[in-house]
Amino acid sequence: KAETLERLKGKENVTQSGQKIDVSANITSKEDIENVIRNDANGVGMFRSEFIYMESGSRFPTEDQQFQIYKLAAESMGTKRVVIRTADIGGEKAVDCMEILGENNPVMGYRGIRVSLDKEEMFKTQLRAILRASVYGNLAIMFPMISSIEEAIAAKNVLEKVKRELYEEKIAYDENIQVGVMIETPAAVMISGELAREMDFFSLGTNDLTQYTLAMDRTNRRIAGYYNPKHPALIKMIRIVANNVHLEGKRISICGDLAADLSMTEQFINMGIDELSVAPSQILALRKHIRELK
Ligand code: PEP
Ligand code: MG
């Protein structure tokens, strides 16, 4: 492995016929950053920020606690982009600081962007922390579990409000910070053309997209044999999203587990997927595989 890494260090992720694709990392903590750098990734494609909330016990993480973590991520990655996904609380991601009780279908319930839009103070605290950290590197913001244009616009409006507040307090932030959404509901796939006019970038969450498209709980072991992210319906959806996003000249990445499936890489490159974001431990194998493709 060490030998492979030495050979790949600083090299582009390009196939033998010259097709390029970025390989970035999915992380859950600041401890992961070291691994991202060691494996020479092109950036952080998704920082699962809800882990900060999971680890903060019965209290919400404060603005400053979050700021320190995002600042460290930004500084450590230098000019490379770090996409902070805003808290995707709920569903299978339980946190102690907010109990969500009494739902028959938590995965279809109060989760992700729905929680953020409902708990605006919590959302604003996170956005303030990200914006304050944005001057220390190349940060971007991504909203999870989007299922309508209205939600995406509402989330952007909260961000604009926070920017204005920081401006009035004379606190610096990156005015051109890029804002994207996850495509992980079938609705988001179907409106990806409209979303592509509103947002700067996109990332396919194939874990949830598989769950919602096939109507199969991603955590249910009994049906694990049926849960198939390579189902033709999913492949068609990925293709539709890539086309819609590219028609607007925007970038599409894949950050679900399917991004690391080496049997799919060639197909993803042929679809024009711009970036694959995988666990830090999967970066090397994927980079090696890309350079071996014809
Ligand atoms: C996904 O749903 O594919 C995804 C990347 O997000 P998470 O696994 O954190 O839900
Ligand atoms: Mg998801």
Image (spheres, rainbow, N blue to C red):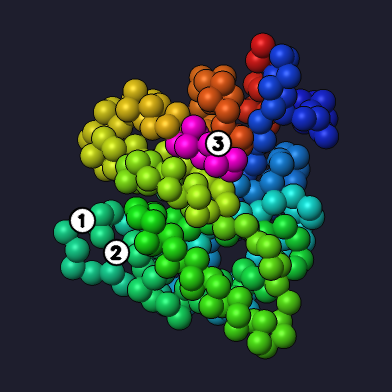
**281 shown above or below 106:** above
Q: Earlier in the sequence, mark 1 or mark 2?
A: 1
Measuring 46% from the left and 66% from the top, which residue is drawn there? 155
- Residue 54 visible? The answer is no
Residue beneath the point at 64% across and 41% down: 24
Task: Kindly tell me whether mark 2's CB lies below 8 Å from ligand 2.
Answer: no
Specify the amino acid type for callout 1: Asn
Eyeballing the image, is 6 above or below 31? above
Within 8 Å: ligand 1 and the Cβ of disc 3?
Answer: no
Label 3 CA crowd tier, 10 Å (few <14, some 14–19, many 20+): some
Tell me where the magenta segment starts and ends, as one range: 241-250
User: Which SS class for mark 2?
Assistant: loop
In contact (CB < 8 Å): disc 3 and disc 2: no
Disc 1 packing (10 Å; few <14; some 14–19; many ≥20)? few
Q: CA distance from mark 1 to mark 2?
A: 9 Å
Q: Secondary structure at mark 3?
A: helix
Q: Which numbered tag is attached to residue 110?
A: 2
Q: Mark number for residue 105?
A: 1
The kind of secondary structure the magenta stretch mainly shows is helix
- Residue drawn where x is 56% and y is 21% of the image: 270
Q: SS at mark 1?
A: loop
- Point out the image quarter for the N terminus: top right
Q: Which mark is residue 44?
A: none
Q: Disc 2 residue type?
A: Tyr
Q: Which residue is mark 3?
A: 246
User: Marks 1 and 3, how far apart in space?
Assistant: 34 Å
245 falls in the magenta region: yes
Choose between 154 and 145: the one closer to the eye.
Answer: 154
Tell me which amino acid carries mark 3: His
